[in-house]
Image: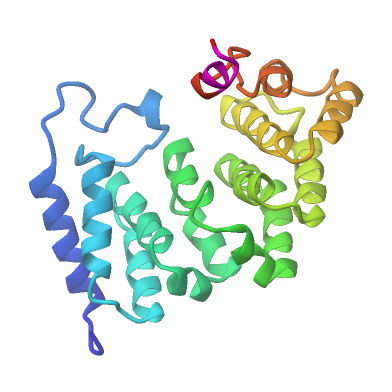
């Protein structure tokens, strides 16, 4: 794949998406209330998108080509192209290492709604990916938290979900609390749900700190964040109902 034509590869993937698309009887732009995306849809399920990403990566392309194709896909017109770009990076450790925070900032400018933002921010980049260039990632997240684009502000929260849930590195938790404090007064659901998600992710490793934070900021935090995070601390789930795993362990 030394002389790969990125535009041609992108075109082939779009053809595959179009071929795999399913008829949809609702809004031709997609179920906007579910995804939050304003981009057109091919109505291709996530399992098929995952298959396409894995299939393309079977040839073991160099990191530069993975990033180049992901960049092209993020700039594509459809929801599936954009989320397919995130899947490519998620399945390629070399591609993630080659993806810089500056690239992330540009890619986020191409995404709208929780489904697209979360596809790139929620689980693609690991705690180790962040730690490898933490000053640059921290600076990016701080910029995103202050960005006038609400999608980027959501990204500032969601980018910290995996690092805080999977690592004890205090730098992730410290920044998470700072970003939550900055964005807690907002009441758009794109932000309130992400605030809740990040606090619940923090709860796994920083339960006492989260409990104290909720008490100290209870008048500012969104009600949903208070309710779901308190339930998470008490029961291990945001609903307050014990998970099946806990019920089995307790002999329920």
Residue sitting farthest toward the bottom: 2
Estimate the x, y position of residue 27 in percent, counting from the top left: 23, 25
Find the magenta span and give its range: 246-251
- The image quadrant that residue 66 belongs to is bottom left
Task: Name above or below for residue 112 compared with residue 193.
Answer: below
Q: Quadrant of the C terminus?
A: top right
Q: Main secondary structure of the magenta part?
A: helix
The residue lying toward the viewer, choosing from 156 and 93, is 93
Residue at the spot 83% in from the left edge and 24% down from the top edge: 214
Residue sitting farthest toward the left: 19
Estimate the x, y position of residue 157 in percent, counting from the top left: 65, 43
The residue lying toward the viewer, choosing from 168 and 191, is 168
Residue sitting farthest toward the front: 251
Relative side of 82 to 161, left or right: left
The residue lying toward the viewer, choosing from 212 and 184, is 212
Task: Name above or below for residue 227 compared with residue 110.
Answer: above
- The image quadrant that residue 217 belongs to is top right
The residue lying toward the viewer, choosing from 200 and 69, is 200
Residue at the spot 81% in from the left edge and 36% down from the top edge: 181
Q: Is residue 249 magenta?
A: yes
Q: Is residue 75 visible?
A: no
Estimate the x, y position of residue 195 in percent, counting from the top left: 67, 32
Estimate the x, y position of residue 94 in percent, counting from the top left: 45, 74
Q: Quadrant of the N terminus?
A: bottom left
Residue at the spot 77% in from the left edge and 56% down from the top edge: 169
Q: Is residue 248 magenta?
A: yes
Task: Name above or below for residue 63 compared with residue 249.
Answer: below
């Amino acid at each position: 794949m030394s002389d790969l034509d990125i535009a041609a590869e992108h075109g082939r993937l779009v053809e595959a998406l179009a071929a795999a698309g399913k008829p949809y009887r609702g809004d031709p732009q997609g179920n906007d209330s579910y995804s939050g995306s304003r981009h057109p849809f091919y109505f291709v399920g996530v399992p098929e998108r995952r298959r396409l990403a894995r299939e393309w990566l079977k040839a073991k392309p160099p990191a530069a080509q993975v990033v180049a194709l992901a960049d092209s896909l993020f700039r594509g017109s459809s929801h599936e192209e954009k989320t397919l770009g995130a899947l490519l990076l998620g399945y390629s450790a070399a591609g993630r290492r080659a993806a810089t925070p500056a690239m992330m900032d540009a890619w986020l400018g191409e995404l709208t709604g929780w489904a697209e933002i979360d596809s790139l921010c929620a689980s693609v980049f690991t705690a180790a990916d962040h730690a490898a260039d933490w000053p640059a990632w921290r600076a990016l997240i701080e910029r995103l938290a202050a960005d006038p684009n609400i999608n980027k502000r959501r990204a500032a929260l969601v980018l910290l979900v995996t690092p805080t849930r999977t690592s004890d590195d205090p730098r992730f938790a410290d920044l998470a609390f700072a970003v939550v404090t900055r964005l807690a007064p907002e009441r758009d659901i794109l932000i309130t749900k992400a605030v809740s998600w990040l606090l619940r992710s923090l709860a796994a490793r920083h339960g006492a700190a989260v409990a104290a934070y909720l008490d100290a900021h209870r008048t500012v935090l969104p009600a949903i964040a208070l309710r779901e995070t308190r339930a998470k601390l008490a029961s291990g789930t945001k609903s307050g109902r014990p998970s099946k795993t806990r019920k089995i362990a307790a002999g329920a």
